[in-house]
Amino acid sequence: MSTTIYQVVGFLLSVLGLAGCIAATGMDRWSTQDLYDSPVTSVFQYEGLWRSCVQQSSGFTECRPYFTILGLPAMLQAVRALMIVGIVLGAIGLIVSIFALKCIRIGSMEDSAKANMTLTSGIMFIIAGLCAIAGVSVFANMLVTNFWMSTANMYTGLGGMVQTLQTRYTFGAALFVGWVAGGLTLIGGVMMCIACRGLAPEETSYKAVSYHASGQNVAYRPSGFKASSGFESSMKNKKIYDGGARTEDEGQSHPSKYDYV
């Protein structure tokens, strides 16, 4: 896959994940009433991060927002904070990634600047996805704990034969939307970081070339000197000895009497 495909696919996945995080945060069905073994089925209750709702069998629904902040459980406030931080980081990463797209040219922006912007947006998307997944997981853990505690408290007295009316809550649709959205945002951020490597300009290594000034090379001999051009010396490859000039090939193929001394 090319760099452009990685970048565009990561951008689209991050946009879908961010939209899912926003939708999950605003949904009311984070926790829904468990109707298993419930003697009252004419009223259905569900709760979200911002309000709780009651739906009657006639179809009438009444929702009441949480009018307090300090009176809410600490875990619920932590989930709110994680989701808001994830949305804010995702929005900033989305704006940065739009300018970092390879298919969009803004002035004389270099590829190195686009690579840095792509990496920055990818890291923001990864953190946003982790925040969304963490927030949903914390809320799900809180639901599981409260569910089993409510189940244990439902049966009291006479060896568990007396059942008390207590509402239990289970997973709502918003939890699954949040998990999927966080995963998409995380995968999109990873793909943006992978695309950053292809956008970064490669370092070009230039071979060093030595330039020689045109002139004459002077070969010294005991009896004087001989002037020869650089082209002639490189083509003939002569080696000068005392008493005459002899090529290297001749010196190697016909040893002289001095070689055996």
Image (spheres, rainbow, N blue to C red):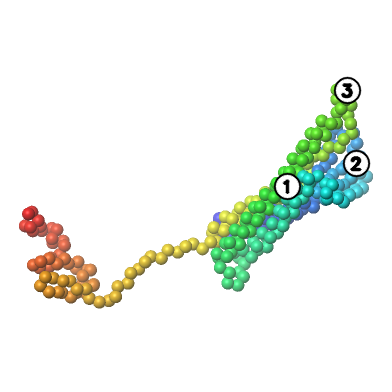
Q: Amino acid at mark 3?
A: Leu
Above or below, 218 relative to 143 = below
Q: What is the number of the mark on residue 135?
A: 1
Query: Please, what secondary structure does the residue beneath circle 1 have?
Result: helix
Query: Please, what secondary structure does the residue beneath circle 3 have?
Result: helix
Give the Cα separation between the discs numbered 1 and 3: 40 Å
Q: Label 3 neighbourhood size at 10 Å, few (<14), some (14-19), many (20+)?
A: few
Residue at (9, 56) in percent of width and height: 259
Query: Does residue 113 appear left or right of residue 245 in this picture?
Result: right
- Residue 24: x %, y % from top left: 76, 50
**Mark nearer the N terminus (2 vs 3):** 2
Query: Does residue 150 appear left or right of residue 260 in this picture?
Result: right
Residue 133 visible? The answer is: yes
Residue at (63, 51) in percent of width and height: 187
Residue at (57, 57) in percent of width and height: 195
- Residue 106: x %, y % from top left: 62, 70
Between label 2 and label 3, give the one nearer the viewer.
3
User: Farthest residue toward the bottom?
Assistant: 215
Residue 191 picture quarter = bottom right
Q: Amino acid at mark 2?
A: Val
Q: Amino acid at mark 1?
A: Gly
Query: Which residue in the protein does label 2 denote?
Result: 43
Query: Which residue in the protein does label 3 denote?
Result: 158
Q: What is the number of the mark on residue 223?
A: none
Query: Please, what secondary structure does the residue beneath circle 2 have?
Result: strand
Give the Cα separation between the discs numbered 1 and 2: 28 Å
Residue 20 visible? The answer is: no
